Each structure stands twice: as structure tokens, then as C-alpha cells.
Image: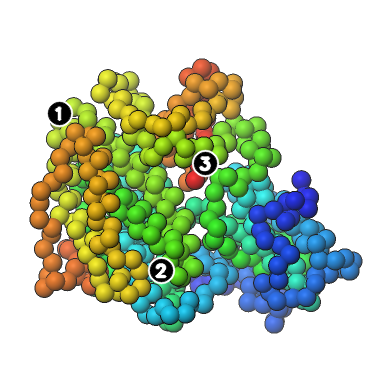
Amino acid sequence: MSRTSDGGATVHDYTTSTTSTPGTGQDDHVYLSLADAAPGPEGEGRWAYGTGFADPLLGVDTALPPGLDGADLAAYCQMLGDDALVLAQRLIEWCTRAPELEEEVALANLGLDLLGQARLLLTRAGQADGTGRTEDDLAYWREEHEFRNVRLVEAPNGDFAYSIARLLLFATARGALYEALSAHPDPVLAAVAARGVKELAYHREYATAWTLRLGDGTPYSSGRMQAGVDAVWPLLEELFTAHPVELRAGVDPAALREPVLRSLGAVLAEAGLTVPDVPPLATVLGLAGRDGVHTEALGPLLAEFQVLARAHPGATW
Amino acid sequence: MVTGDVVTGPGPTGTAEPTGGTVATVGTGTADPTARELAWAVAAAVPDPELPMLTLADLGVLAEVGVDGGSGTVTAWLTPTYSGCPAVAEMAADVDRRLRAAGYPDVRVRLRLDPPWSTDLITAEGRRKLAEAGIAPPRPTAAVAAAGPVALTLGPTRTGTATASTTVAAPRTAAAPPVPCPRCGDADTEELSRFGSTACKALWRCRACREPFERVKEI
């Protein structure tokens, strides 16, 4: 996810006059070489080899708050980070395929927000469990069963209406969750959530506007939108089903069910659509995405997402 | 532009230096506030990579600058805009490079996530520069929030096939402030797309002068 997976050490390869001063700080070597690489005060060359600032939590206090188990916090951050990462990948798949150019830009922007949240959450996970794994380690080098995202985000994009319906469900539920997490004892998670609330509000607004346009449009568009809502609805319940880690380290998602359903119901009613009456997607012996049990859709998504990093381990550009 | 107000503005000052240093003196042996002001002036002049007409101080991204008197270490805290803002690394690198070029031997750049960045942190000077560059500045977030919950207003159709059924609107408790055209000043403007060329901008057009323009959206 970052351009230099090794913290920018390769910047040295492109400069000859750089010497870092031992003992003056961990940051110096990267920055000095960067300064030397810039031909002028605003020269284009100053970013040509990456900036070396690969850590999305650069300098943020990484201490764990007392009373919070590091492994639990890490697992929880992975759950939320995986949700954001996988949905970001699905949204980005719309590039070159959306109905209008503006929608491609919009969907890519939403994906970028989620990718940013995923970077922070996965970085935090690697800190909290003491392994020191980076965001790249977690994103590119975990297997399918190690991903903890809900199945809602991994489902294939379907048609535009399905993607919009999925986005509406996710953004409504995640906005509510982030709002609750803004008061989380872990200051990093709380800060990610506080900023995420504002971003998810835009995501929800976007999905709402399209749900209204299609649902309250022609009979044909309304039928397509209703079909999208019907198809995605069985995946909603998993968002409200608590995993033990969520109960220990985060917010009980069951508490979100009522307000989220009320909000979704209001949007669907305004759009002239009906709330589907369908059972939730079955689990496997009670296990689902939070336990690493996924649908067949996640494997191909990860294969595409991870192939470059795995084909060229440690590559930088 | 660099005043005591700016230096002591968004970031807490007068508190203990997070680096644990003593009263700051840099070079001339001046007292802490002046040393910090000097370093702030350097960092504050760094242009934003995506909105180069603004400095990081104009944008409200530069939260605080501290100078450690003992070691001479300068620490700059940045508050990133959006979670996925791809320019954070460039901002950090630029601040670092400018401070080193100004003669500070030991520079640290740190991110500060709390409180989150808001468009309310864009200074009056920043808003003026945005408008001057043809980019409509953001409205105060409080005024937009007062206009009610997420509006169920549909965007305009761009394909010229608008029908009556595309204008559903939810009731608002108050009208949101208008977005005047940065070119002609007319308030008769409309949104083309909520998402523009960067995460922080939306695409609008003026119905009076017919010019499209970008707008920094409230967050």
C-alpha cells in the first residue's frame, strides 16, 4: 500500500553525497538523502524516489491504554481494517466500468478513504499485538482464512444497483460504529474513527442519492434497485453479530442494529422500495467472516490484490 | 502572516515539549517562543502538494512546531486531511526538507490524528487564496450541519434527460449557505459531482456565467 515497503531505505541508492549522522535520530538518513535528491527548492525530483514517509502512524504515540489487551485490540483493528481494505478493492474495480466518468471518480474516492482507514487500522494492529508487522505485511502476506472482514464487503460487485445497495448498508452501519468508537480508550482507534465518521457520512450520502435516483426513477430502474437491495440484504445481519473479540475490545455491534435498520428503512421508503424480508446468509457451523470463514469470492479478490507484492517481495518503486 | 497568533494557534503551546527538552534556544540564544516562531515560519511556508496556492499553515495541516532547546531538535506535527490523502508523505517530506535547508540539523515530523482535521481549520488567508485561484472555499461546517441531516436531494442530471421524478428532496430545517461562483460571484450554482480531482474537492458549475469550478467541500 505504501510506495516503499522498507521505509524508504532505497532512497540511498540514488544519492551519493548523503551521509546520515549516527545517533541523531532514527529519521535522519531518509530525509537527508531526500533533500539532496531535490535539484531545486520546488524541483520535481524531490519526490521521484518516494518520500521515505511510509508509516501512516508516523510519530503517533503507540502505547497501549491500560486495561486493553494488545492481542484483542490487534484482532479488532484487523477486523475493521480488513472490512475497509476489501471494500476499497471492490470499489476500485469500478474504475473504467462505471456508468459515467463522474461515478468512477466518486467510487475511487470512496475507495481511497477506506484504503486510508485500512492503512491506519492495520498499522495499529501490527503495533498492538507486538509483532511489529507493517500494513504491507498484513495486507499482502496473510492468507484468505486470516482475513477477518465480514462477507458483505467481499461479495462481487454485481450490477451498479447491487454495489450501491452494498455501499448504503456498509456506510450506514460503519458510520454508526465509528461514531461509537470515537470514544474508544485506544487513542489511535478513536482518532481513526473520529475522522472516519465524517468520511462515511459522504459515502452514505452518495449511496443514498443513487438509491433515491434509481428507486424513484423509472419502473425499470426501480426494479433493478430493489433487486440489488434484495440480493445484498442477507449479508447485513453479520454486521450486527458480535464476535467475542468485538465484545472485549470494541463496541457490541448488536447495539447498532436498531438505529441502522431505522436509517436504512427511511431511505428505502423515500426511494419507494421495500425492506426485504429474507433470512441472513447461513454461517458454517456458526462461523463467518470474523472467524476467517469466507465466501468463494474472497480468494480471487486477494489473488489479484496480492499478486504483485508476492511476485516481487520487497520491491519498491 | 507569521504572528504570535499563528504560532500559538491550533497547536497547544506553552505546554511541556513532547520531546522532553528544556527552554528552547536556537542559534541566537533567544527564548522559547521566538525560537518556535522562527521554526514555525519555515514550516508554515511549505506549499500544499495538491493545492499549491495554499501553505500548510493556510490549510490548517500544520498543527504545531516545537523546538527543543537542549538538542536543537525541531519537531513539526501535521494533521492529515482525509484518511486516504495521498499527499501526506509529500507534506512530511517537504516540511522536513525546508527545515533542514533553513539550518536546523535535527528535524522530526510527526502526525497528529486528534483532533481530526476539518475544513474549519483553513485560515481566512487560505480561503482568500482558494477563491483567488478559482476554487470555492468551504463553508463553515456548523452552518452546513444546521441545514439538517444528510439531504436526500438528487444531483443534477448531466445527460439532458431530466424528468420531474429526479427531484426528490427531503425537508430541510434551514437552508445551507449558498456556494457563490468564485469567478463571477453569482450564487446560482449547482453541484456536478460530489467527488472531484482530489479527495477534498467537489465539481460545481455556475449557472450564471456557465463556468465549471472546483469547491473544497466541508468536512
Foreground tag (1 vs 3): 3
Q: Relative to A232, is A285 above or below?
A: below
- Residue A233 at x, y percent in the picture: 17, 51
Q: Which residue is mark 1?
A: A219
User: Helix or strand or loop: what does disc 3 sit on?
Assistant: helix
Q: Which residue is mark 2?
A: A122
Q: CA distance from mark 2 to mark 1?
A: 43 Å
Give whichever of B187, A14 is nearer the camera: B187
> Label 2 lies in what chain?
A
| Three-letter code, disc 1 | Pro
Q: Quadrant of residue B151?
A: top left
Foreground tag (3 vs 2): 3
Q: Is residue A278 visible?
A: yes
User: Going by the picture, which residue comes out furthest to the front?
Assistant: B173
Quick check: marks 1 and 3 in contact, CB under 8 Å? no
Identify the residue at image location x=87%, y=65%.
B30
Give whichever of A311, A292 is nearer the camera: A292
| Three-letter code, disc 2 | Leu
| Three-letter code, disc 3 | Ala
Identify the residue at image location x=67%, y=72%.
B18
